Amino acid sequence: MPEYRFTCPHCNACATVDGGVRERLLVAGCPVCAGSVDAPAFVEISPHSTDTP
């Protein structure tokens, strides 16, 4: 299941969430400020990044 980096556009709360939580947040809004969120608040991240410093 993909993971996403969530950033609230209202209060800037951040969290890494899975697809199920992403769907719930799209319906229920930010768990910190209750502001509505839409798809741009989520950026898909790779759990197995091949980038090395």
Image (cartoon, helix red, strand yellow):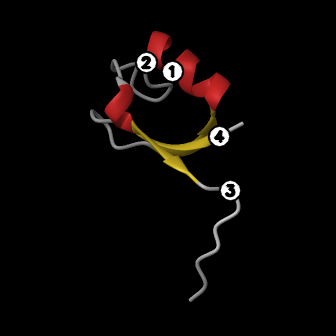
- The answer to the question of whether label 2 and label 3 lie on touching residues, with beta carbons closer than 8 A, is no
- 45 is higher (above) or lower (below) than 11: below
Mark 4 or mark 1, which has the lower sequence index? 4
| Residue 28 coordinates in the image, percent (x, y) | 48, 12
For mark 2, does the 10 Å Cα neighbourhood hold few (<14), some (14 to 19), or many (20 or more) residues?
A: some
Instruction: Give the foreground label among 2 and 4.
Output: 4
> Helix, strand or loop at disc 4?
loop
Residue at 64 percent of width and 67 percent of height: 49
Name, please, the residue furthest toward the front: 50
- The answer to the question of whether label 1 and label 2 lie on touching residues, with beta carbons closer than 8 A, is yes
Checking the image for residue 29, the label placed there is 2
Mark 4 or mark 3, which has the lower sequence index? 4
Checking the image for residue 47, the label placed there is 3
Mark 1 or mark 3, which has the lower sequence index? 1
Residue at 35 percent of width and 23 percent of height: 38
Residue type at mark 2: give it: Gly
Name, please, the residue furthest toward the bottom: 53
Q: Quadrant of residue 52?
A: bottom right
